[in-house]
Amino acid sequence: MANEQGFQGKMFAWLESIISCELPNDTTCVFEMSPQDAKKPDRSSDEMDPRLELPPQIADLDDQSFAYEFQEFLTHLAIECNWHVHNDTCYKHIRAGEKRGDHNCRMRLDGSLQVVTSIDVESGSIELRRWRGKVNNYMDLIFFLLQSNPDSQFIGSGEAAKAAVFYITKYITKGNLPMYTGLQALEYATKMHEQKFEVEENVGAERINCSLITKSVNALMGQQEISHQQVMSYLVGSGDFYTSHTFQMVKWYEFVHAAERLDQDMKSLPIDDGLVSEDNDTLLNEEQITVNVMPDAVEFTSEIEDYALCPTSAHEFNDLCLWEFVERTRMRRHTFRRHIRDRR
């Protein structure tokens, strides 16, 4: 893009049309000749906060009136939300006793101006024009709809793109866990693991190891942070996950344990004494059964029984593996009523 002036000009014009670093009515750089020029304009006591005010409604105004009100509303929003004022957050990384000022504000809103958009030769990133030294970037439409500081940034390539990818990845994964917290979680998981198998006998080493790994992973994951957006989404009832498909739950460990028990029972029984039944009733023993108590009935459900007792003679269920059975079948409740005739 640096060598193609035509494409560069179109790219710059497009970015300048959607991202603003100035007030809506500014036509050139506004230089700060004195500290008073850099000061955020005060909002009068009788003027409503634009973040709480109902924005102009296009249905109530003609096109010309709405365009005017739109620009005026954006001006108030930009002053209230995007006009930067230094505070303690700007200097939380500086050393004790270090002088505070525009030069070490971590928000990098130091009052510097840029007349035209250009490309940084060293990093290759696009530096947008900045006509107001203390007004943060915004996109007018998003700004109008959100009525808060959207902090709009163009990230194409260069150092900014790498930093953004690193920040977003780190923020989503929340991978950093303090060592002392991780060790405490592992200690708790180990104690719970030992208590569980103190009373259980004849348990294989493989199952013990799997249980320890599961408890350790759950303990560590329980210490991970979750974002503010996840918490609020859960609180307002919007759910904490979104998928493009519908998923069925299967308690895989129940089937594994049932198969292990069947294998052990088959090995412990004599082969030629007639005790091994063809129906394999052993498979249906000791699995977890869900009991649903209703006002007029008691319902028992078992995933293992549902799969083991499905009608294999029917064409629809013939040769269905467990995965296909869970994927393709659904349980439906049917009500059967008995009609009893009174005899008197």
Image (cartoon, grey):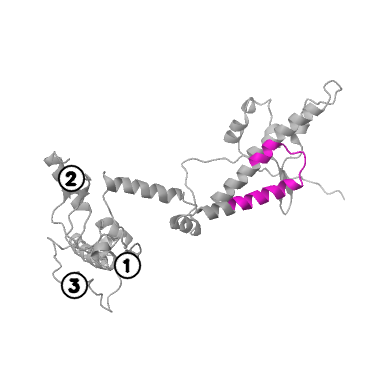
Say if residue 291 shows up in the picture: no
Q: Nearer the viewer, mark 2 or mark 1?
A: 2
Q: Circle 3 sits in a helix, a strand or a loop, which is it?
A: helix
Q: Which region of the structure is painted magenta?
A: 185-210
Count of numbered badges drawn on the protein:
3
Query: Label 3 belongs to which residue?
Result: 35
Q: CA distance from mark 2 to mark 3?
A: 32 Å
Q: Amino acid at mark 1?
A: Arg
**Real-space Cα separation, disc 2 to disc 1, in angstroms:** 39 Å
Q: Residue at the spot x=62%, y=52% of the render?
A: 187
- Determine if the magenta segment contains residue 229: no
Q: Earlier in the sequence, mark 2 or mark 3?
A: 3
Residue drawn at 61 percent across, 38 percent down: 330
Q: Secondary structure at mark 1?
A: loop
Look at label 2 and name its amino acid. Answer: Val
Locate residue 135, reporting x and y percent: 23, 63
Q: Nearer the viewer, residue 37 or 46?
A: 37
Secondary structure of the magenta portion, mostly? helix
Residue linked to disc 1? 51
Q: Residue at x 68, y 27 (%)?
A: 312
Query: Which mark is on residue 121?
Result: 2
Check disc 3: other Cα within 10 Å, few if <14, some if 14-19, many if 20+. Answer: few
The x and y percentages for residue 210 are: 64, 40
Q: Name the side, left or right, on which 282 lies relative to 193.
A: right
